[in-house]
């Protein structure tokens, strides 16, 4: 009986094992290669999806703008700090370069007001009651749900014309007679004070609210010139009643016979006890009291604060935000008329004592800080 040779069987078995290992190794390589192709394919699909998601720049811009406009600033930061992260800055799609940062400017103005209002050290200069005096300053456009707080000597005549047209009293700004604008019996502008308490609160909570400011000292110069020097609207009581009252109390040189001087005016406004004269003068003081006293910016949450110095940008923005830019335009602004004039300010304050100027600044400090106007150190030091 013959037996098979054990060496031949071993070689055959080794050959089969080698063949199986070679096949298994190739199988793993194919699996690895297939996995690589799958990863590449998925990456291409994901890239295509991302491209499609952001292909429409208008849709992306709208999402970014919504995020930006609804961002709530951090209440714990200090005035002057930037409160908006990079991703919340406006994209500026379809806007000229000069308008890219506009929404941020207006939000920062409102944020500055909130911060100053929280400053206890300035509380007496930034807070006031929402009294009838304040409500008398706020004009109402119910048709378009707008409240406008009047701040005299800051281009308010033109804004009144805008509201008169919106209220339907006249078809266009050009057709409004000048003598009607400030005649509250004829201009069709109701004051907020004419409504019931419930109606007042409803409008304060739901309407678009705005007012305009300018450098506080430059505004005082404008008020002095308009009421005591030129008096273009022929309001004789300013020269014949108010001016003599100021001169009697505040003129240092009793032998001086000239009419009221800017120095007399400054001394009156800077006097901590000015209120007894204010009571005698009545509502005429609206031309020179603080923005705080006129509009109560810490008590009323305004939608937009415009600046006289940037009115060319601010006026169209306010009309757009109020939703009325397709109905009316702000009257043409003569070039350079709204620019801050430091030389004029220096000229008017020339010769006035530092003590009197510092007392004047002490009264208007709240206005300077609430609205971001630089402290006039060139006058104070």
Image (cartoon, helix red, strand yellow):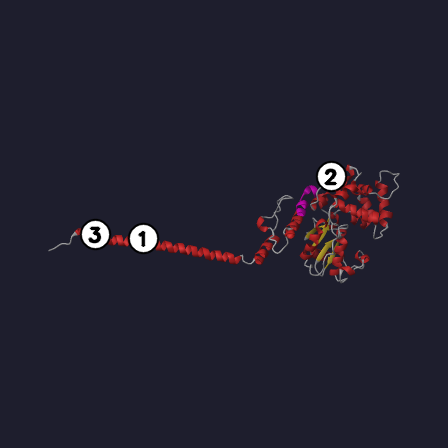
**Mark identifier at residue 25:** 1
N-terminal of the pair, mark 1 or mark 2, is: 1
Horizontal and vertical percent position of residue 150: 75, 52
Disc 1 to disc 2, how far (Cα)? 87 Å
Residue shown at the point (75%, 41%) measured from the top left: 361
Left or right: where 292 falls relative to 1 = right
Figure quadrant of residue 355:
top right
| Front in this rendered view, residue 104 or 75 | 104
In the current view of this chain or complex, which residue is farthest to the left? Answer: 1
Left or right: where 247 falls relative to 95 = right
| Front in this rendered view, residue 360 or 295 | 360
The secondary element bearing badge 2 is classed as helix
Disc 3 to disc 1, how far (Cα)? 21 Å
Horizontal and vertical percent position of residue 339: 73, 48
N-terminal of the pair, mark 3 or mark 1, is: 3
Give, as a single range, the part of the protein colored magenta: 112-122
Horizontal and vertical percent position of residue 350: 79, 39
Task: Locate the N terminus by quadrant.
Answer: bottom left
């Amino acid at each position: 009986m013959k037996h098979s040779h054990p060496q031949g069987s071993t070689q055959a078995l080794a050959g089969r094992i080698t063949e199986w290992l070679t096949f298994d190794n190739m199988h793993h390589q194919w699996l690895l290669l297939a996995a690589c192709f799958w990863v590449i394919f998925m990456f291409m699909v994901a890239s295509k999806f991302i491209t499609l998601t952001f292909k429409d720049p208008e849709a992306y811009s709208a999402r970014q703008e919504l995020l930006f406009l609804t961002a709530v600033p951090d209440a714990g930061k200090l005035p002057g700090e930037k409160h908006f992260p990079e991703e919340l800055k406006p994209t500026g799609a379809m806007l000229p370069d000069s308008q890219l940062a506009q929404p941020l400017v207006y939000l920062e103005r409102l944020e500055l007001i909130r911060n100053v209002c929280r400053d206890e050290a300035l509380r007496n200069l930034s807070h006031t009651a929402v009294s009838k005096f304040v409500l008398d300053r706020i004009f109402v456009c119910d048709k378009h749900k707008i409240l406008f707080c009047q701040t005299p000597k800051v281009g308010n005549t033109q804004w009144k014309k805008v509201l008169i047209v919106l209220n339907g009293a006249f078809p266009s700004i050009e057709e409004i007679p000048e003598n009607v604008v400030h005649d509250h019996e004829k201009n069709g502008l109701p004051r907020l004070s004419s409504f019931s308490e419930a109606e007042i609160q409803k409008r304060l909570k739901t309407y678009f609210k705005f007012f305009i400011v300018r450098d506080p000292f430059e505004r005082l110069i404008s008020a002095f010139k308009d009421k005591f020097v030129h008096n273009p609207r022929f309001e004789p009581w300013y020269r014949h009643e108010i001016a003599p009252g100021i001169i009697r109390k505040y003129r240092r040189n009793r032998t001086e016979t000239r009419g009221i001087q800017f120095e007399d005016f400054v001394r009156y406004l800077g006097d901590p006890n000015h209120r007894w004269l204010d009571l005698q003068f009545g509502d005429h003081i609206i031309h020179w009291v603080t923005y705080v006293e006129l509009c109560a910016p810490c008590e009323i949450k305004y939608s937009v604060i415009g600046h006289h110095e940037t009115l060319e940008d601010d006026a169209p923005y306010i009309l757009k935000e109020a939703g009325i830019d397709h109905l009316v335009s702000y009257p043409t602004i003569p070039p350079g008329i709204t620019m801050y004039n430091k030389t004029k300010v220096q000229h008017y304050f020339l010769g006035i004592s530092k003590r009197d100027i510092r007392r004047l600044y002490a009264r208007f400090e709240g206005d300077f800080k609430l609205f971001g106007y630089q402290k006039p150190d060139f006058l104070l030091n």
